[in-house]
Amino acid sequence: MWFKKKVQAKPEEKLDLPEGLWVKCESCGEILYRSELEKRVWICPKCNFHFRIGSRDYIALLLDEGLLEELDSEMEPLDPLDFPDYKKKLKSAQQSTKLKDGLVYGRAKIGGIPVIFASMDFAFMGGSMGSVVGEKVARAIRLARSEKKPLIIVSTSGGARMQEGIFSLMQLSKTSAELALLAKERVPYISILTHPTMAGVMASYASLGDIIIAEPGALIGFTGPRVIEQTIGEKLPPGFQRSEFMLEHGMIDLLVSRTELRNTLIRLLKIICKVQ
Amino acid sequence: MNGGIYLDFEKPVIELEKKIEELKKLSGVEDEIERLQQQAERLKRKIFSNLTRWQRVQLARHPKRPYALDIINLITEDFIELHGDRRFGDDPAIVAGLAKIDKHSIAIVAQQKGRDTKEKIKRNFGMPHPEGYRKALRIMKMAEKFNIPVLSIVDTPGAYPGVGAEERGQFEAIAYNLFECTLLKVPIVVVILGEGGSGGALAIAHGDKILMLENAIYSVISPEGCASILWRDASKNKDAAEALKLTAQDLLKFEVIDEIIPEPIGGAHTDYQKTAENIKSVVMKNFRELTALPVDELIQKRIEKYRKMGVYKE
Ligand SMILES: [Zn+2]
């Protein structure tokens, strides 16, 4: 049975962010005041870099009253391959993030419009997709289909989770298959890409949105830049695989600053769902 | 068929076979030849019934292993290759087309590696670009239009990790194939022939039945990639192959694949003809079963199959 819980973002749960009073911007190197950054939803005032934030932050930022009626919150990963150190890594990720795995989903409202909302956590093993993430995405899609509510997924991921081997790869098939059924019922799906969204997640549900929105400066692609550099034997140009680059190459619909994300979603949903 | 290229664990057999060839030039040694042939056979059986995962990786990547076109030419009567994605270009790492197999019409999409240096470069080592995946989808949609089943042959180290591939949406090409193949109204039978390299393989491996050759591999990441992440040492690829559980035998146990296609003792590279016969007989059996299903049931079963994939606790 599903588990009903209300989650509201609290500042002390910003677990994916650097500790301390001062924070260095990973993009421009500027040293910034932590409290100042918090007020600016973790956007660098100097270069507009969007720091990584967690699912709790997106719940607070995007959903009406910052509320998510979370489902399947107790679902947990197993270790089907008996993979070296996986159990240990899971335990430590669960302790440090206070999450069971890298994705939460449930029912919510945005601008009064009921939606199914899912959001990933990079802090949980690099947002990697194993069986739990894949199954929760699949269930979120099925729920959106059965309740005919728009689906919104905020993605951030390094790709499929190596430690679950072939089962992780199969989540690409599983989630894409559910999206084919969702599309057949003409239920809208908005995919939001945040820094970084790569590999297996990009090669499945994250790039199958009717509308794909990306935050500025997010790394988006299939193969990571280091592997590409090793393969071609040269340095990649600045900005390669960033969201601005992907917009230019026709891979995303919109580039939206974090501060405008909620408003943009409301405007889009009002048009798609034909409400005033 | 072994022309000078062999793996370390094949060596004892190769040496015995060489000795037999030399003895054949002499007369009056028939008994000795007979004895050595039996010994070689026993040795081969012994080695090939106890392969480690890493040895299977080596067999899957064997430079003499049959590639997609070798198999296509042996199992089909009239293969007509069709080119291009109608969007950007033609990717030689993927061959696609129409064919007759035992008088039945089929469509084929396949990843193709190159044998010599020139062909390796032409085929980009079997690593497709987005236009390759889009060509494959175009041919699969054509198959749907003409109501003919699809045979997909997988053999790739992975999707090409390059600048153009990213610019043209490698991720989108893979995702869209999975999306579109879900509701394709004709059967899709997939054969993992050699290497099934992650998302680059999966892009043409989303179908009704997943068949895998006895010594093929299929994995979320290469053993080398896994080893460099886990132990920061790509030379620990043997340990990584063990950890990843990437063999046909592992995947059948996990119920991720449906059937193993046996290889001749000594590996697929020692007998292309026999390998092709084995592939053909299993593929045809699956086509017969799948084409007998009503379309709705075919698609429903395909969806259910992917719904079941994954291991978690609630
Ligand atoms: Zn900055």
Image (spheres, coloured by chain):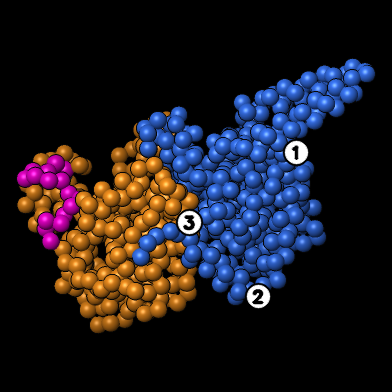
Chain colours: A orange, B blue
Examine the rendering and report whether any part of residue A33 can be seen.
Answer: yes
Residue A82 lies, in percent from the top left, at 42, 47
Q: Main secondary structure of the magenta part?
A: loop
Residue A15 among magenta residues: yes
Dot 3 falls on which chain?
A: A
- In three-dimensional space, the C-alpha distance between marks 3 and 2, rounded to whole angstroms, equals 25 Å
**A159 versus B236 height, above or below:** below
Both on one chain, marks 3 and 2? Answer: no
Quick check: is B125 in the magenta stretch?
no
Quarter occupied by residue B15: top right
Q: Residues within 10 Å of mark 2 (few under 14, many from 20)?
A: few
Q: Relative to B205, is B61 above or below?
A: above
Q: CA distance from mark 3 to mark 1?
A: 32 Å
Q: What label does residue A170 carry, if any?
A: 3
Q: Position of residue A66 (x, y in %)?
A: 17, 69
Does mark 2 have its CB less than 8 Å from ligand 1? no
Query: In the image, which residues are magenta?
Result: A10-25
When the figure is inspected, residue B236 is found, relative to residue A149, above or below; the finding is above
Quarter containing the C terminus of chain B: bottom left
Mark 1 belongs to which amino acid? Answer: Asp
User: Which mark is first along the chain, 2 or 1?
Assistant: 1
Residue visible at 22% across and 79% down?
A: A112
Residue tagged 1:
B271
Amino acid type shown at disc 3 = Met
Q: Quadrant of residue B51?
A: top right
Q: Secondary structure at mark 2?
A: loop
